[in-house]
Image: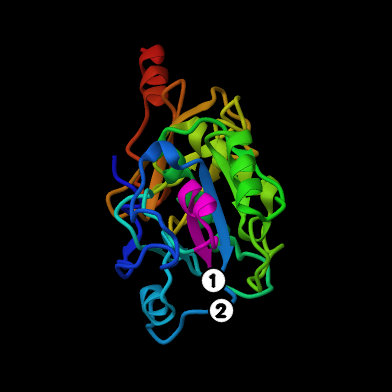
Amino acid sequence: MSWLDWAIDDPAPGNCGYSILNVPCEVDPSLRFGMTVHGADGYWSGGRRPSATMAALGNSWGSTVLQDGTTYKHRPRPTFVNWHGGGPAQNIGTEAIEAEGKRELWTPPQRASIARVCIDTWKWFGWGDVKLGAPTDRTQTGIRAALLSLGYGSLWEHNWFDNTDCPAGRDDWPWLVAEVRKGIAMGISLNQPIVDVARTPKGDGGVFCFGKAQFYGSMGGTPLAKPIVAIEGTRTGNGYWLVAADGGIFSFGDARYHGSVTELRQALAKK
């Protein structure tokens, strides 16, 4: 299964974790328990990529999400040991996202991309539910015990593992947990707009867009004879069709309307 194939490739340097860690550069998937979100405490500008920062500082991580939602993929798989924790327990136990910024909250595009990275990672490992971690005693023994207590599919703030200067509290954990759960339940890639059937079982036609997918409208708030059951994007990515259970079609963006089964049924009924 591919991982973050929608992100920009920006390979990390060869270093894995801190040089003092006696751990391999890549671990068995069974040793990965969850995801750590790390605050970058800085910005990338002028065309400088995160891999250049890694090379300069001698560190590494799995992916970077900029404030505009742009996402860089630094590893071919989420099983590499990265610098992001300071000890074997968290370096082996979790994959890492680096979130651009200092003390400000995640931006809306950044939030969407962080959720998307998490969803792809959960699917890659086959983890089930999302389990939110909590601050540990910051010892290797305590961190290991915390990871094992939650099992697979745990989500962590970097500062819960280590006392660092990296900014904490920029996140919205209840939102992120709910968003990742929703993406897992849908079982589809989020490189296109999706119908929010998980949140609205009646299929009221609400459309939620992720990453760089644009919103072109929805049937949310409009009374429907039958619920929306599917969505299909246009080849350009600049529009989509919503499909209702009774064959009704609703077009948005550059999606052209050519008729529907509902109209055909009504025409036949008049004959």
Q: For residue 42, which numbered disc appears in the image? A: 2
Q: Locate the N terminus and report the quarter of the image it occupies.
A: top left
Q: Amino acid at mark 2?
A: Gly
Q: Amino acid at mark 1?
A: Glu
Q: Give coordinates of residue 204: x percent, y percent.
A: 59, 32
Q: Is residue 87 above or below residue 250?
A: below
Comparing 137 with 50, the one in front is: 137
Choose top left, top right, bottom left or bottom right for residue 124. Answer: top left
Comparing 231 with 9, the one in front is: 9
Residue 261 shows in the view:
yes
Q: Is residue 135 left or right of residue 222?
A: right
- Seen at 44% across and 66% down, the residue is 20
Q: Give coordinates of residue 155: x percent, y percent.
A: 59, 46
Q: Which residues are magenta?
A: 84-100
Q: Is residue 188 above or below residue 78?
A: above
Q: Give coordinates of residue 132: x percent, y percent.
A: 65, 42
- Seen at 38% across and 39% down, the residue is 29
Residue 178 shows in the view:
no
Residue indicated by mark 1: 100
- Asked if the magenta segment contains residue 94, the reply would be yes
Does label 2 or label 1 sit earlier along the sequence?
2
Secondary structure type for disc 2: loop
Q: Are marks 2 and 1 in contact (CB under 8 Å)?
A: yes
Q: Is residue 149 left or right of residue 14?
A: right
Q: Cα distance, mark 2 to mark 1?
A: 6 Å
Q: Give coordinates of residue 214: x percent, y percent.
A: 46, 57
Q: Locate the C terminus and report the quarter of the image it occupies.
A: top left
Q: Is residue 155 left or right of residue 258?
A: right
Secondary structure type for disc 1: loop
